[in-house]
Amino acid sequence: MRILKTNVILLVFIICLSGCSGSQAETVLGKIADILPRQPSNVEKSAAAFFEAVDNRDTDAAKALFAPSALADEENFDTALEQLFILYTSPTDECWSDSTPSASKHLKYGKTTYHSVSGWIPVVSAGVNYYCYIVVTDIDDEAPENIGINKLVFVTEKALCAADFERPQENGLWIFDDPPDADYQTCRIGENAYIYTPSAQKLTKEDAVSFVEKNASWSDFTVRFGAPNVTVYSDPRDWNIYYYELPDEDGEARWIRLLVEDGSITSAVLMGRSYHANGVLWKKED
Protein backbone atom coordinates (compact mmCIF):
# COMPACT_ATOMS: atom_id res chain seq x y z
CA MET A 1 0.00 0.00 0.00
CA ARG A 2 2.87 2.39 0.81
CA ILE A 3 4.59 1.63 -2.48
CA LEU A 4 1.36 2.34 -4.37
CA LYS A 5 0.94 5.66 -2.56
CA THR A 6 4.55 6.58 -3.35
CA ASN A 7 4.07 5.86 -7.05
CA VAL A 8 0.88 7.92 -7.19
CA ILE A 9 2.53 10.97 -5.59
CA LEU A 10 5.57 10.60 -7.85
CA LEU A 11 3.31 10.42 -10.91
CA VAL A 12 1.52 13.60 -9.84
CA PHE A 13 4.89 15.35 -9.35
CA ILE A 14 6.08 14.32 -12.81
CA ILE A 15 2.84 15.54 -14.36
CA CYS A 16 3.25 18.89 -12.58
CA LEU A 17 6.77 19.28 -13.99
CA SER A 18 5.66 18.49 -17.53
CA GLY A 19 2.36 20.33 -17.51
CA CYS A 20 2.66 23.25 -15.10
CA SER A 21 0.71 26.31 -16.28
CA GLY A 22 -0.41 24.55 -19.45
CA SER A 23 1.58 25.24 -22.61
CA GLN A 24 3.42 28.06 -20.83
CA ALA A 25 5.35 25.43 -18.85
CA GLU A 26 7.66 24.95 -21.81
CA THR A 27 8.88 28.56 -21.92
CA VAL A 28 11.67 28.43 -19.31
CA LEU A 29 12.47 24.79 -20.11
CA GLY A 30 12.81 25.81 -23.74
CA LYS A 31 15.29 28.53 -22.80
CA ILE A 32 17.32 25.95 -20.88
CA ALA A 33 17.32 23.62 -23.89
CA ASP A 34 18.60 26.43 -26.10
CA ILE A 35 21.58 26.97 -23.79
CA LEU A 36 22.54 23.53 -22.49
CA PRO A 37 24.11 20.86 -24.72
CA ARG A 38 22.49 18.20 -22.49
CA GLN A 39 19.25 17.30 -20.79
CA PRO A 40 18.49 19.55 -17.79
CA SER A 41 18.77 17.98 -14.34
CA ASN A 42 15.79 17.46 -12.05
CA VAL A 43 16.99 20.48 -10.09
CA GLU A 44 16.84 22.64 -13.22
CA LYS A 45 13.50 21.17 -14.33
CA SER A 46 11.93 21.79 -10.94
CA ALA A 47 13.32 25.32 -10.73
CA ALA A 48 12.13 26.07 -14.27
CA ALA A 49 8.63 24.79 -13.54
CA PHE A 50 8.50 26.86 -10.36
CA PHE A 51 9.56 30.07 -12.09
CA GLU A 52 7.03 29.39 -14.88
CA ALA A 53 4.36 29.46 -12.19
CA VAL A 54 5.88 32.61 -10.66
CA ASP A 55 6.00 34.32 -14.08
CA ASN A 56 2.29 33.58 -14.44
CA ARG A 57 1.59 34.51 -10.81
CA ASP A 58 -0.08 31.11 -10.52
CA THR A 59 -0.18 30.24 -6.81
CA ASP A 60 -1.81 26.83 -7.30
CA ALA A 61 0.74 25.72 -9.92
CA ALA A 62 3.65 26.83 -7.72
CA LYS A 63 2.32 25.03 -4.64
CA ALA A 64 1.60 21.86 -6.64
CA LEU A 65 5.34 21.42 -7.25
CA PHE A 66 6.16 21.25 -3.54
CA ALA A 67 6.09 18.13 -1.39
CA PRO A 68 3.10 17.95 0.99
CA SER A 69 5.52 18.06 3.93
CA ALA A 70 6.98 21.35 2.65
CA LEU A 71 3.49 22.89 2.72
CA ALA A 72 2.85 21.97 6.37
CA ASP A 73 3.05 25.63 7.39
CA GLU A 74 0.79 26.84 4.61
CA GLU A 75 0.32 30.35 5.97
CA ASN A 76 4.06 31.08 5.98
CA PHE A 77 4.38 29.47 2.56
CA ASP A 78 1.65 31.69 1.09
CA THR A 79 3.25 34.77 2.65
CA ALA A 80 6.65 33.90 1.16
CA LEU A 81 5.11 33.31 -2.28
CA GLU A 82 3.34 36.67 -2.21
CA GLN A 83 6.62 38.31 -1.22
CA LEU A 84 8.30 36.66 -4.22
CA PHE A 85 5.52 37.83 -6.57
CA ILE A 86 6.27 41.40 -5.47
CA LEU A 87 10.06 41.10 -5.52
CA TYR A 88 10.57 39.13 -8.75
CA THR A 89 9.93 41.17 -11.89
CA SER A 90 9.51 38.30 -14.42
CA PRO A 91 9.67 36.90 -17.00
CA THR A 92 12.48 34.44 -16.34
CA ASP A 93 15.26 34.74 -18.92
CA GLU A 94 17.78 32.26 -17.47
CA CYS A 95 17.44 29.36 -15.07
CA TRP A 96 20.24 26.85 -15.51
CA SER A 97 23.55 25.67 -14.07
CA ASP A 98 26.67 24.03 -15.47
CA SER A 99 27.50 22.46 -12.12
CA THR A 100 26.41 18.94 -11.17
CA PRO A 101 23.69 18.77 -8.50
CA SER A 102 24.41 17.00 -5.23
CA ALA A 103 22.55 13.72 -4.84
CA SER A 104 21.54 11.51 -1.95
CA LYS A 105 20.47 7.92 -2.59
CA HIS A 106 19.51 4.98 -0.39
CA LEU A 107 19.36 1.38 -1.56
CA LYS A 108 17.66 -1.64 0.00
CA TYR A 109 18.24 -5.07 -1.52
CA GLY A 110 19.33 -3.37 -4.73
CA LYS A 111 16.22 -1.19 -4.96
CA THR A 112 16.38 2.59 -4.67
CA THR A 113 14.22 3.54 -1.71
CA TYR A 114 15.25 7.21 -1.50
CA HIS A 115 16.65 9.68 -4.00
CA SER A 116 17.03 13.43 -3.65
CA VAL A 117 18.99 16.09 -5.54
CA SER A 118 19.95 19.63 -4.58
CA GLY A 119 21.94 22.59 -5.81
CA TRP A 120 22.18 26.31 -6.56
CA ILE A 121 20.69 27.67 -9.78
CA PRO A 122 21.43 31.20 -11.02
CA VAL A 123 18.25 32.90 -12.23
CA VAL A 124 18.10 36.00 -14.42
CA SER A 125 15.12 38.28 -15.05
CA ALA A 126 15.26 41.65 -16.83
CA GLY A 127 19.06 41.59 -16.57
CA VAL A 128 19.00 41.17 -12.78
CA ASN A 129 20.82 38.25 -11.15
CA TYR A 130 19.09 36.11 -8.54
CA TYR A 131 20.04 32.77 -7.02
CA CYS A 132 17.91 29.79 -6.07
CA TYR A 133 18.85 26.86 -3.85
CA ILE A 134 16.51 23.93 -4.39
CA VAL A 135 16.11 20.44 -2.91
CA VAL A 136 13.97 17.92 -4.80
CA THR A 137 13.01 14.40 -3.72
CA ASP A 138 11.63 12.03 -6.35
CA ILE A 139 11.72 8.76 -4.36
CA ASP A 140 11.02 8.27 -0.67
CA ASP A 141 9.41 4.93 0.17
CA GLU A 142 9.47 5.62 3.91
CA ALA A 143 7.91 9.09 3.69
CA PRO A 144 6.10 9.64 0.37
CA GLU A 145 4.84 13.01 1.63
CA ASN A 146 8.39 14.27 0.97
CA ILE A 147 8.17 13.72 -2.79
CA GLY A 148 8.42 17.01 -4.66
CA ILE A 149 10.30 20.22 -3.96
CA ASN A 150 11.33 20.08 -0.30
CA LYS A 151 13.06 23.44 -0.08
CA LEU A 152 13.47 26.47 -2.29
CA VAL A 153 15.57 29.43 -1.14
CA PHE A 154 15.31 32.51 -3.37
CA VAL A 155 18.05 35.09 -2.77
CA THR A 156 18.92 38.44 -4.31
CA GLU A 157 22.58 38.95 -5.17
CA LYS A 158 23.17 41.44 -2.36
CA ALA A 159 21.45 39.17 0.14
CA LEU A 160 23.63 36.23 -0.88
CA CYS A 161 26.77 38.36 -0.46
CA ALA A 162 25.77 39.60 2.98
CA ALA A 163 28.21 38.57 5.70
CA ASP A 164 25.43 37.21 7.90
CA PHE A 165 23.54 35.25 5.24
CA GLU A 166 22.86 31.64 6.22
CA ARG A 167 20.88 29.18 4.15
CA PRO A 168 17.86 27.98 6.14
CA GLN A 169 17.93 24.38 7.32
CA GLU A 170 14.15 23.99 7.43
CA ASN A 171 12.14 22.95 4.37
CA GLY A 172 9.63 25.20 2.63
CA LEU A 173 9.88 28.42 0.62
CA TRP A 174 12.31 31.11 1.75
CA ILE A 175 12.74 34.58 0.26
CA PHE A 176 15.70 36.91 0.95
CA ASP A 177 15.56 40.48 -0.36
CA ASP A 178 18.43 43.02 -0.26
CA PRO A 179 19.50 43.78 3.32
CA PRO A 180 18.58 47.33 4.39
CA ASP A 181 22.26 48.18 4.99
CA ALA A 182 23.58 46.71 1.74
CA ASP A 183 25.77 49.67 0.74
CA TYR A 184 27.98 47.58 -1.54
CA GLN A 185 28.00 46.59 -5.20
CA THR A 186 27.85 42.97 -6.34
CA CYS A 187 28.54 40.98 -9.46
CA ARG A 188 28.12 37.50 -10.85
CA ILE A 189 31.20 35.58 -11.96
CA GLY A 190 30.55 32.12 -13.32
CA GLU A 191 27.57 31.05 -11.22
CA ASN A 192 28.64 32.77 -7.99
CA ALA A 193 27.89 36.14 -6.41
CA TYR A 194 30.63 38.41 -5.05
CA ILE A 195 31.03 41.85 -3.56
CA TYR A 196 32.42 44.03 -6.34
CA THR A 197 34.69 47.07 -6.25
CA PRO A 198 34.61 49.03 -9.53
CA SER A 199 37.81 50.32 -11.12
CA ALA A 200 38.44 53.27 -13.40
CA GLN A 201 39.75 51.15 -16.27
CA LYS A 202 39.30 47.51 -17.22
CA LEU A 203 42.32 45.27 -17.51
CA THR A 204 42.83 43.36 -20.77
CA LYS A 205 43.77 39.69 -20.76
CA GLU A 206 46.66 40.41 -23.13
CA ASP A 207 48.18 42.95 -20.72
CA ALA A 208 47.72 40.61 -17.76
CA VAL A 209 49.33 37.61 -19.48
CA SER A 210 52.18 39.70 -20.85
CA PHE A 211 52.94 40.91 -17.33
CA VAL A 212 52.79 37.59 -15.46
CA GLU A 213 54.92 35.86 -18.08
CA LYS A 214 57.77 38.13 -16.98
CA ASN A 215 56.86 38.86 -13.37
CA ALA A 216 54.47 36.77 -11.26
CA SER A 217 54.73 38.90 -8.11
CA TRP A 218 51.26 39.69 -6.79
CA SER A 219 52.34 42.94 -5.15
CA ASP A 220 53.96 44.13 -8.39
CA PHE A 221 50.84 43.16 -10.32
CA THR A 222 48.63 45.33 -8.08
CA VAL A 223 51.07 48.24 -8.38
CA ARG A 224 50.82 47.98 -12.17
CA PHE A 225 47.07 47.30 -12.55
CA GLY A 226 45.53 48.41 -9.28
CA ALA A 227 43.48 46.51 -6.72
CA PRO A 228 41.29 43.61 -7.89
CA ASN A 229 37.56 44.03 -8.42
CA VAL A 230 36.82 40.94 -6.33
CA THR A 231 38.63 39.24 -3.47
CA VAL A 232 37.22 35.79 -2.82
CA TYR A 233 38.56 35.33 0.70
CA SER A 234 39.23 38.08 3.22
CA ASP A 235 40.61 35.92 6.02
CA PRO A 236 44.39 35.34 6.31
CA ARG A 237 45.68 32.35 4.34
CA ASP A 238 48.60 31.27 2.20
CA TRP A 239 46.59 31.53 -1.00
CA ASN A 240 43.69 33.48 -2.41
CA ILE A 241 41.66 34.03 -5.57
CA TYR A 242 41.24 37.48 -7.10
CA TYR A 243 39.18 38.64 -10.07
CA TYR A 244 39.75 41.52 -12.46
CA GLU A 245 37.00 42.66 -14.79
CA LEU A 246 37.83 42.41 -18.49
CA PRO A 247 36.15 44.02 -21.50
CA ASP A 248 33.01 42.18 -22.58
CA GLU A 249 33.25 39.55 -25.31
CA ASP A 250 30.27 38.82 -27.58
CA GLY A 251 28.15 40.98 -25.31
CA GLU A 252 28.94 38.96 -22.17
CA ALA A 253 31.01 39.86 -19.13
CA ARG A 254 34.49 38.37 -18.87
CA TRP A 255 36.83 38.11 -15.89
CA ILE A 256 40.38 36.98 -15.26
CA ARG A 257 40.77 34.77 -12.19
CA LEU A 258 44.18 34.90 -10.55
CA LEU A 259 45.31 32.27 -8.08
CA VAL A 260 47.90 33.74 -5.71
CA GLU A 261 50.00 31.46 -3.53
CA ASP A 262 52.60 32.75 -1.07
CA GLY A 263 52.67 36.13 -2.77
CA SER A 264 53.06 34.83 -6.33
CA ILE A 265 50.51 34.44 -9.12
CA THR A 266 50.41 30.78 -10.15
CA SER A 267 47.59 30.77 -12.71
CA ALA A 268 45.37 33.07 -14.75
CA VAL A 269 42.03 31.71 -15.95
CA LEU A 270 39.36 33.30 -18.16
CA MET A 271 35.85 33.24 -16.67
CA GLY A 272 32.42 34.14 -18.03
CA ARG A 273 28.89 33.25 -16.90
CA SER A 274 29.51 29.51 -16.86
CA TYR A 275 30.46 27.45 -13.81
CA HIS A 276 33.42 26.14 -15.80
CA ALA A 277 36.38 28.24 -16.89
CA ASN A 278 36.51 29.53 -20.46
CA GLY A 279 40.17 28.64 -20.69
CA VAL A 280 43.57 28.83 -19.01
CA LEU A 281 45.42 31.97 -20.06
CA TRP A 282 48.62 31.29 -18.16
CA LYS A 283 49.96 28.81 -15.64
CA LYS A 284 53.18 28.77 -13.69
CA GLU A 285 55.53 26.03 -14.80
CA ASP A 286 56.12 23.26 -12.24
Image (cartoon, helix red, strand yellow):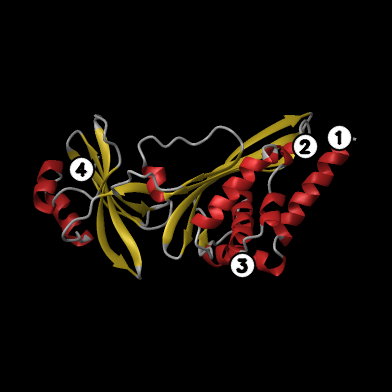
Number of residues whose C-alpha sits closer than 10 Å to that of mark 1, classed few (under 14), some (14–19) or many (20 or more): few
Horizontal side of 219 relative to 187 (left or right) equals left
Nearest the viewer among 263 and 58 is 58
* Residue beneath disc 3: 27
Q: Secondary structure at mark 1?
A: helix
Which mark sits nearer the N-terminus, 4 or 3?
3
- In percent of width and height, residue 238 lies at 24, 30
> Residue at 71% across / 55% down in the picture?
60
Placement of 244 over or under 169, stated as above or below: below
Q: Secondary structure at mark 4?
A: strand
- In percent of width and height, residue 48 lies at 60, 57
* Residue beneath disc 4: 265
Q: CA distance from mark 1 to mark 2?
A: 8 Å
Amino acid beneath label 1: Arg
> Residue at 13% across / 50% down in the picture?
226
Amino acid beneath label 3: Thr
Nearest the viewer among 9 and 36 is 9
Nearest the viewer among 86 and 68 is 86
* Residue beneath disc 1: 2
Residue depth check, mark 4 versus mark 1: number of the one nearer the observer? 1
Which mark sits nearer the N-terminus, 1 or 3?
1
> Residue at 43% across / 56% down in the picture?
129
Q: For residue 144, which numbered disc appears in the image?
A: 2
Q: Secondary structure at mark 2?
A: helix
* The quarter of the displayed image where residue 235 is located: top left
